[in-house]
Image (cartoon, rainbow, N blue to C red):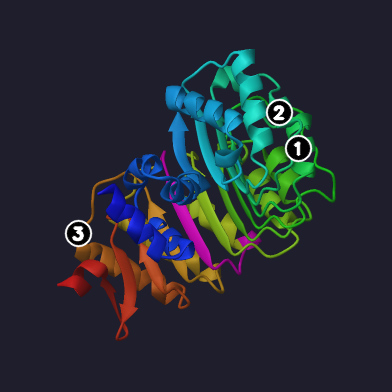
Amino acid sequence: MVDSVRSRSSVLPVETLELIFNHLDRCELIPLLGSNSILHNIASRAVYRNIPETSSVKALKLIKTLTSNATYSRHVRSINLDFANNLLTANILRLLNRALQKLKSLTALILDFSQTDNAADITWIFQGCSFSLTTFTSSMRCDRSLAKFLGIQPTITELCLRGFNKEYEFALEPEALPKLEHFRTVLSYPSIIGEVLRGRPVESVSMSLYPGDVCRSLDTLLLSATAIKRLTVMSFEIDPPITLLPLIADRLPHLEAFHLVVLMTHYTHEILLEIGSSLAQFKALRYITFMAPGTPSSSNDEKSVAEVWSKACPTLQTIILPKGLVWFQKDENWACLKDHEE
């Protein structure tokens, strides 16, 4: 068997083998690491290029490997490390720092820590790192140290700050994040959202809205240097959605895609129909998703909602309602994927 594998690997160019390996699952690649030197080298590139979510003990073993093996570490382009359920010692954080220093080709980084670790300033783990990120996601607290780190990552186009923490001093330099296009956050602080959006070409935003901060949070959307085209909102507001939509339409009349998740207000078929009038203010809305708790509607009820919404907002092309069906226009009528499959 070994001779057979060796003979085939000598016939196929390395580039061809690499293309094949890129279509294999991670569990299929791992055994190839122990086959022969040629397949090991090719498989290691595929295994370590994009490292999926790794947590706890496996994450610790991984950063030890990356610290000690320069061949593996130089292959890494993206990595997702989840320590949310662990309390990290200073030694582990120092080990993480050494591992990150080895990832010179890293472009996408996801780092999650526990609430206890997020309460401390741990951005020193980036000291000595030379990677240039395009995507950064973290639960780290938003403070001056994190702002300083973001200031030396000018190639970031996608940023996600999802930590639940206190409001620290967070000020970005005006020239920081010049290429930022997509911003996601679960923070409730308008000051932080505004600091990220101000003067940057952000056209896609995902945010949470909390009682008392709705208008201030929505006002930050006006600070982007370009018109925001896509907006995702998770609303903890107790007022009905029909009061929220005009607030968004007033600020973003040319929004193209809107996804709204309402957590505190139950919907009814009548409420869904009433929302239609609020959509008339949108001039370019093509895609809308509305999710909320409530009694499930029938497919016919949702179809009537889609018809009312599209009449109020003729630019709509796709509508997703709480039942989860995707509604779209077909032959001047509204149909869902379920109907289309039948």
Which residue is at a point 55% across and 37% down the rendered structure image? 210
Image quarter of residue 283:
bottom right
Expressed as whole percent of the image width and height from the top left, the position of residue 33 reads 40, 42
Q: Quadrant of residue 281?
A: bottom right
Task: Specify the quadrant that holds the C terminus.
Answer: bottom left
Q: Residue at x 53, y 29 (%)?
A: 65
Crowd band around label 1 with a 10 angstrom C-alpha radius: few (<14), some (14–19), many (20+): some
Which amino acid lies under the numbered mark 1 shown in the image of this protein? Phe
Disc 3 versus disc 1: distance between alpha carbons? 50 Å
In this view, 59 is above or below 7: above
Q: SS class of the residue under badge 1?
A: helix
* Tag 3 residue: 298
Q: Which residues are magenta?
A: 250-264
Amino acid type, label 2: Thr
Q: Which residue is mark 1?
A: 149
Q: Residue 123: which disc?
A: 2
Mark 2 touching mark 3, by CB under 8 A? no
Instruction: First in sequence, mark 2 or 3: give its number.
Output: 2
Front one among 280 and 154: 154
